[in-house]
Image: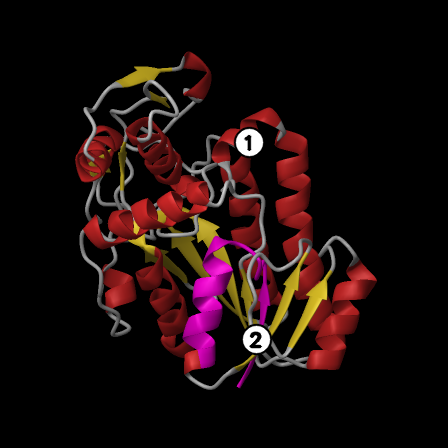
Amino acid sequence: MKYLVTGISGFVGAYLFDQLSSKGHDVVGVDAYPLSMPLALSRFYQMSLMDQSGIRGVIEQEKPQRIVHLASASSVGSSWQQPTDCFVNNTNIFLNLIEAVRLSGLKCRILSVGSSEEYGPVAASEMPLKEIRPANPMNPYAVARVAQENMSRVFAKGYGMDIVCTRSFNHIGPGQTDRFVVSSFVRQAVEVSRGQRPKIICGDLDVVRDFVDVRDVIAAYDCILDKGISGEIYNVCSGQGVTLRSILERICSKVGIPADFQVDPALIRPIDNPVIIGDNTKLCSLGFALAYEGLDAAIDGMVVWWQKKLDEGGKG
């Protein structure tokens, strides 16, 4: 089967490629950036999805049977700094993609990857979050993701296109950039252990999040593509909530340093969701089960990855 994966150069893209190629699938990649690591893709197109004619040309030439849309500007923090860029990019690249499929007349299944940020602030007493809860986005990134999800449903119902959607919760693993909180914690902890910085700088450590190992995330995507119902939304989550404080303390213990940190007010978001925990019952009804429960395997891998990365003088 031929897959087209947008955002293939990103963190999740490499893991998804490994999963698909191990099953013998033909994988074509599209990304605005060069490949971050060598991947044995059938073809790679370095291009912006803002190029309407360009992406239509790729769709008509490749004729994929499945499309996984990973491409996005996915940092909530950055979306507060550049709200216009975040909204325009995330909504238009998806619209250009599905419109290219529609205009080409291609019959294929599309996975629209969304975010738990779409739910917005919800009382802890109302956790875990189910897909039937209305979206209430409270940051620019989340607003764009809701627009993408709504457009998915419009094209699924109005044009009869085969689109399934996720609301993906926080995922972690080796290779994740330090623009994301857990990877930033790991990098800083390794630097502290080497005497390269005095302490870890952080934001609000009392927020609760539902983290998933990236390997379970891509397994969930594969399951949804195989068995998900067109037009439906599926939470990709663990069903367990942990505080950022507990994760940071665990990281510090693993690298053998005191849990010494300093809160930087600049890292605290104008509006934040204090607790986000998902319900994965709908996903599990498709036959999915977590293979990496708990975060130790992911954090251990991230520590090793950052140690090697810093040895090489690299940046995440």
Residue 78 versus residue 60 in the image, above or below: above
Three-letter residue code for mark 2 = Ala
Residue 29 versus residue 300 in the image, above or below: below
Viewer-proximal residue, 199 or 104? 199
Q: How is the image coloured?
A: secondary structure
Residue at screen point 45% across, 38% down: 178
Q: Quadrant of residue 291?
A: bottom left
| Stretch of the chain drawn in magenta | 1-21
Place of residue 48 in the rendered image (x, y in percent of width and height, measured from the top left): 73, 55
Q: In the drawing, what numbered circle is on residue 78?
A: 1
Q: Nearer the viewer, mark 2 or mark 1?
A: 2
Place of residue 206 in the rendered image (x, y in percent of width and height, measured from the top left): 24, 24
Q: Is residue 10 left or right of residue 125?
A: right
Residue at screen point 37% across, 50% down: 305
Name the residue beneath numbered marker 2.
Answer: 40
Q: Is residue 169 visible?
A: no
Place of residue 240 in the rendered image (x, y in percent of width and height, measured from the top left): 19, 46
Mark-to-mark CA distance, 2 and 1: 31 Å
Mark 2 surroundings within 10 Å by alpha-carbon count, few (fewer than 14), some (14 through 19), many (20 or more): few
The disc, 2 or 1, on the residue closer to the chain's N-terminal end is 2
Q: Quadrant of residue 40?
A: bottom right
Residue 41 versus residue 1 in the image, above or below: above
Q: Secondary structure at mark 2?
A: loop
Place of residue 154 in the rendered image (x, y in percent of width and height, measured from the top left): 59, 59
